Image (cartoon, rainbow, N blue to C red):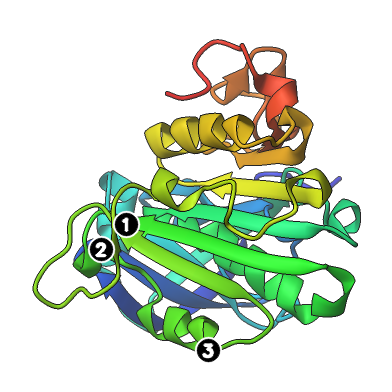
């Protein structure tokens, strides 16, 4: 019988500093782990502990895996101190990913905030793998300041990609910023060129950003069942045993972390 808590060993092979407190780690594992975009893994620092993260890499690539991590706690602080060659371990993947089959033939609106672009990066790369299956791909991304923008090189590449539309905003600009200034909700508009009636919206970011982005999407005509939220809860065990990630009758680790808003609307604590 397989032990669900037994991870696959591996090493960090590259580290990219995205911002002052966010890094992307490229992992090479002793055994390839394939995942569906939107699923998460438990990343272990041997002898220290583990934490859940959603891979940010293209799910088509199986010999390496990228994970983008913000330094916010004990395990992530130690991860930020690791170097290429250091050992890690991974178990998973867990949970339900984005239902790409249901997105086919539709216009896709992606709304990301801060490091919430990490799981969305994997989703966008997956959509671009089969771009002809989707009618339109529109990405709206917001960060607090220009210095807090992640994946700067990739965003420049996407800005010139004719297969997608990208718009970026910052809450507060600086002397280098020539783009839009304002909250992410300022980019969600009735006249943004998306056919709301034939569209799905995918939102990921800080809870307060997800809350008001969802409300704005409903205000411009999206039905709750067409709004997909990636709920980042305390998914400790990853297999629905510990109960730390409970959202009403659901467990984010096995019923999510991707939920449509109609399933969780009204449940206690979804924006916490």
Left or right? Give the position of 229 relative to 31: left
Place of residue 36 in the rendered image (x, y in percent of width and height, measured from the top left) = 76, 60
Q: Residue at x 74, y 31 (%)?
A: 223
Residue 148, numbered circle = 2
Tell me if label 1 and label 2 are in contact, CB under 8 Å: yes
* Above or below 100: residue 216: above
Of discs 2 and 3, which sits in the foreground? 3
Q: Residue at x 61, y 37 (%)?
A: 220
Place of residue 10 in the rendered image (x, y in percent of width and height, measured from the top left) = 55, 74
Is residue 152 visible from the viewing direction of this image? yes
The residue carrying pointer 3 sits among few (fewer than 14), some (14 to 19) or many (20 or more) residues within 10 Å by Cα, namely few
Q: CA distance from mark 3 to mark 1?
A: 20 Å
- Between 222 and 244, the residue placed more toward the observer is 222
Q: Report the residue marked by disc 1.
A: 143
Farthest residue to the left: give it.
Answer: 175
Asked which secondary structure carries label 2, the reply is helix
Count of number-bearing discs? 3
Farthest residue to the front: give it.
Answer: 191
Residue 160, numbered circle = 3
Q: Residue 103's quadrant in the figure?
A: bottom right
Tell me if label 2 and label 3 are in contact, CB under 8 Å: no
* Above or below 16: residue 244: above
Residue 7, numbered circle = none
Q: Which image quarter holds the C terminus?
A: top left
The residue carrying pointer 2 sits among few (fewer than 14), some (14 to 19) or many (20 or more) residues within 10 Å by Cα, namely some
Left or right? Give the position of 28 relative to 222: left
């Amino acid at each position: 019988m397989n032990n669900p808590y037994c991870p696959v060993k591996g090493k960090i092979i590259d580290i990219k500093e995205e911002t002052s407190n966010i890094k992307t780690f490229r992992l090479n594992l002793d055994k390839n782990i394939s995942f569906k975009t939107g699923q998460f893994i438990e990343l272990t620092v041997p002898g220290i502990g583990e934490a859940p993260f959603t891979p940010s890499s293209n799910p088509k690539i199986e010999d390496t895996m990228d994970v983008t991590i913000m330094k916010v706690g004990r395990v992530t602080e130690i991860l930020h101190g690791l170097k290429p060659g250091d050992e890690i371990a991974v178990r998973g993947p867990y949970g339900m990913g984005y239902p790409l089959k249901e997105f086919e033939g539709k216009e896709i609106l992606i709304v990301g905030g801060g490091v919430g672009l990490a799981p969305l990066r994997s989703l966008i790369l997956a959509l671009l793998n089969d771009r002809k299956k989707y009618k339109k791909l529109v990405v709206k991304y917001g960060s607090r300041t220009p210095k807090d923008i992640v994946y700067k090189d990739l965003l420049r590449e996407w800005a010139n990609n004719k297969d997608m539309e990208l718009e970026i905003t910052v809450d507060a600009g600086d002397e280098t910023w020539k783009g839009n200034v304002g909250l992410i909700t300022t980019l969600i508009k009735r006249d943004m060129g998306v056919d709301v009636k034939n569209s799905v919206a995918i939102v990921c970011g800080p809870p307060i950003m997800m809350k008001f982005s969802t409300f704005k999407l409903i205000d411009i005509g999206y039905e709750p069942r067409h709004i997909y939220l990636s709920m980042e809860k305390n998914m400790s065990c990853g297999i629905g045993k510990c109960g730390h990630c409970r959202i009403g009758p659901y467990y984010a680790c096995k019923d999510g972390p991707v939920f449509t808003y109609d399933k969780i609307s009204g449940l206690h604590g979804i924006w916490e």
